[in-house]
């Protein structure tokens, strides 16, 4: 006996059920899907990388200053 899939066609929508109470703002409560949280994480990472590069540049400048002072004396 075959099942009639059209018997619930007017009451059941497999893609969007309005009775579920799903709100699009619920999507942004999850930090994985929140674009503001993702932006803040990217900014923090970029800031960290910039601080790392500044530190490496200053260390290299310090090494050059120490080598120059040894060569001058």
Image: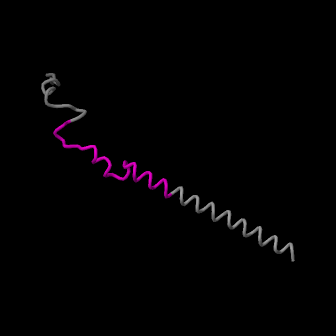
**Residue 19 in picture, x, y percent from top left:** 16, 39
**Residue 40 in picture, x, y percent from top left:** 44, 55
Q: Is residue 46 left or right of residue 1?
A: right
At 37% from the left and 49% from the top, the residue drawn is 34
At 72% from the left and 66% from the top, the residue drawn is 61
Q: Is residue 39 left or right of residue 56?
A: left
Q: Residue furthest bottom?
A: 73
Judging depth in this view, the residue of 26 and 9 nearest the camera is 26
Residue 8, above or below 52: above
Residue 48, above or below 70: above
* Magenta-colored stretch includes residue 40: yes
**Residue 51 in picture, x, y percent from top left:** 58, 62
**Residue 58 in picture, x, y percent from top left:** 68, 66
Q: Which residues are magenta?
A: 17-44
Q: Is residue 13 left or right of residue 68?
A: left
At 12% from the left and 25% from the top, the residue drawn is 7
Judging depth in this view, the residue of 36 and 12 nearest the camera is 36
């Amino acid at each position: 006996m075959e099942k009639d899939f059209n018997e619930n066609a007017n009451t059941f929508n497999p893609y969007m059920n309005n009775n579920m109470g799903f709100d699009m703002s619920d999507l942004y409560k999850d930090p994985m899907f929140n674009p503001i949280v993702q932006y803040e994480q990217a900014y923090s990472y970029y800031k960290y990388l910039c601080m790392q590069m500044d530190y490496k540049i200053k260390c290299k400048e310090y090494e050059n200053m120490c080598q120059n002072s040894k060569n001058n004396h």
